[in-house]
Amino acid sequence: MPSANYKKLCMELLESNSEEQVVKILKRWGFWDNEGAWQLYGGIENNFSVIGNQQSSAQAALIEKFVNSIDAVLMRECYRRGINPESDSAPKSMEEALEAFFGLKTNDLTLLSSKERQKLARNIGFIATGSKERPSLIVLDRGEGQSPKYFPDTLLSLNRSNKMRIFFVQGKFNMGGTGALTFCSDEHNLQLIISRRHPDARRYDEHDPRGDEWGFTIVRRRKPSKNHRSSIYQYLAPAGQVLSFTSKTLDVPLEYSSIDPLEWGTLIKLYEYDLGNLKTNIKQDFFYYGASLRLPQPALPIMFYEDRNYKSDSPTLTYHGLYGRLASTEEKGNIEDGFPVYIEAKVRRQPIMIEIYAFRKNFEGKRQPYKNFIRPSEAIIFTINGQTHATLSNGFFRRKRVKMDYIADSLLVIVKCDQLDSETREDFFMNSRDRLRQRNLEELESVLEEEIARHEALKELRERRRREALSKKLGNDQPLVDLLNKILKNSPTLAKIFIEGQRISNPFDTRPASESQKRFEGKRFPTYFLIREKHEKRNYPIGNTIRIQFETDAVNDFFSRSEDRGTYSLCIYNDEGECIPYPEGIKSFKLYNGTATLVLQLPDDEIQVGDEYQCCLLVESPDRIDPFENKFTVTVVPHIDHSTGEAGKRKPPTEEGGGKREQEQRLATPEVILIRESEWEEHNFNKESALSIQPNGESYDFYINIDNVYLQTEIKANTKIDRQVLEMQFQNALVLFGLSIVRLYEANNTGNGQNSETTEIFQNYENIDGLARPLSCAIAPVLLPMINSLGNLELVESAIVTDDQDVE
């Protein structure tokens, strides 16, 4: 058939927006029912085992298309410069490629002007067409493109090593792009692929008579049948040849916007793609949520085109990542003062950068603006080269070791893993790039738990949020305290459980008001960087770590920003007095509000008690010729058990900051906050909610739903008992119930669980509130009837049956 006719077929398929239309077109052309016209995707009969085992999220799968387009543009630029991408002359990282090909000294696109980003975004486009419920999506790029001859070896291949020897691209496994197929049209998972090779890339191809043509194909899924037990994916290639046509350009038909014709590159159309609950304008839903969290820092910007009938100022939008949104949001004040904060930590002695953003609860009359940035299931995102490879939920912040419950909904943590070596990446992340490997999860999470739990900025914000919550507390809680004490005094069983058992510390922050910090105003370039006097000589207990602190006037992002950043390095002097770099000694490093903290860790198998090391932290600033030098001495001492101190006793108050030791009460009543219906949304309550338990860092706060539907029902139905009495009964019963949960939770989390049954129950809950909420909901309906009914029961002598009596 003439090439011009195949162009007509290609354009018909490109203009179609539904599976039904595509099937009709292919039947009319005689291809749909012709089995000889279809080939196995990847040349593998059981290809569903690979394709069906990719990303579990439609949004994550779509992001792989974006990443492939970015790779294709970088490859194009490599070919244009006459460089073989697999040669030694090619860039060795994505950062090198961006600087060599586009002059970008950093992958921070926020540093570019709007016009510069728009110009770069011309290389990659994302278009929504068709219906609003199930749009057909187009991802196109002006990249290297592929020849029809090489479709089976590139765009339609599986498990090939196409990019394994190319170090400046993201793709490695030659399968990630297929994950989107399972989210295409319901019946046949249809996808259209069109591509043409860039002229400068053809010189590296073997003789190819169709190298200048546009190739195109349709990918479809064939459901299980008598001939094959599982689904298989096929692509259209009559007689084994991908269809092609000759044309200088390819027009992209759009109704509400326009785009320049393609001269080369690749266009992929995903028919009736299922984006889940993101069903509105892609410039809002997918832009704000899907792309931002899945590709927070793209190497190149992407132009979004909304080609459905939505009223908006412009049908296009330049996407440059979550960082672009955060930068603009910071100017508007949605982010808490002093944030983001940065921590450089290490996993397997390899650096990871932890960035923590804390959003305000309210801003300019908007409640909970953080909901535009954070999904509860994706509060911690792990990235490599700007792409998310795994996520953790905000339940992480509520863990026993973290205790950031009060700010858990407001936190977004980005963990950059770019500097991990290939082996470590493979150990931590699945090839699908959307989840962590469970067997190595604890190793990575323990680092995060320690750094987040101990960060001063987070502890300060947690305490401030708690104070704000307690300031809204209704009434005086002294009657509650007195009544609870009376109950405990009169009940030997309760007294034994709560007084002789797990102690509960004073929940209030006892720091003097004079210690409250003023807002820190740092300088872009520091004028001083000095070690604290008491840290110049430190003991290093074997098996532990020590913290060395420095004072400076540098801003918090001095070591982490994209431009004009500072650097630091640790060295140890040898016997000849030479300063030898010792990066492996840095377990973590952070700078916050004028204090830099170095956590030093020495290898246990290489040190002995009595060893002394002369160390130096060098800090270099772009505005200085000479670095700041801070020398300190470390002396190795025996291991210290921090639970007992050196002498096996409780450790005395630290010298730093001084202070008197406070007497710990045997029992401190938890702070009880009564929540009304108007506050339900803020506390994630509903009419059946009863109790929420929030750790405050030292103890627990109890939030009680005083407008609980079962309490209100009892109040209306029971006219003989005063309303305040019923409310007090409900509160006290829930407090005692909550204290019991706390006791068991503490015991099981410290390895002192009462029995295997309770241990197993508590292991199923990531935090105490996750246990308290459903249990209190379950007991709330029977609390007051039980209190007021069982107390009136009397033993009836005739109803008592002993073991030696017969019962008729």
Image: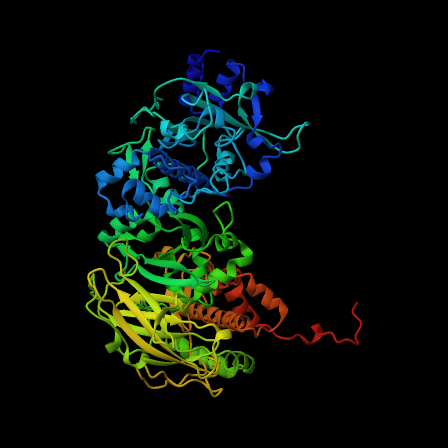
Q: Residue at x 26, y 40 (%)?
A: 117
Compared with 482, 585 (above or below) is above
Q: Nearer the viewer, residue 257 or 794?
A: 257
Q: Residue at x 55, y 61 (%)?
A: 764
Compared with 384, 658 (above or below) is below
Q: Residue furthest front?
A: 576
Compared with 705, 73 (above or below) is above
Compared with 539, 246 (above or below) is above
Question: Where does residue 120 sit, x and y in percent of width and height?
Answer: 28, 37
Q: Is residue 642 visible?
A: yes
Question: Where does residue 400 sit, x and y in percent of width and height?
Answer: 47, 67
Q: Nearer the viewer, residue 722 or 493?
A: 493
Quarter holding residue 473: bottom left
Question: Where does residue 114 sit, x and y in percent of width and height?
Answer: 22, 41
Count of picture labels: 0
Q: Is residue 364 visible?
A: no
Quarter holding residue 559: bottom left
Determine whether, in the image, residue 439 is placed left or right of residue 695.
Answer: right
Coloration of the structure image? rainbow
Quarter holding residue 686: bottom left
Q: Nearer the viewer, residue 427 or 280?
A: 427
Q: Quadrant of the C terminus?
A: bottom right
Question: Where does residue 652 sit, x and y in percent of width and height?
Answer: 40, 86
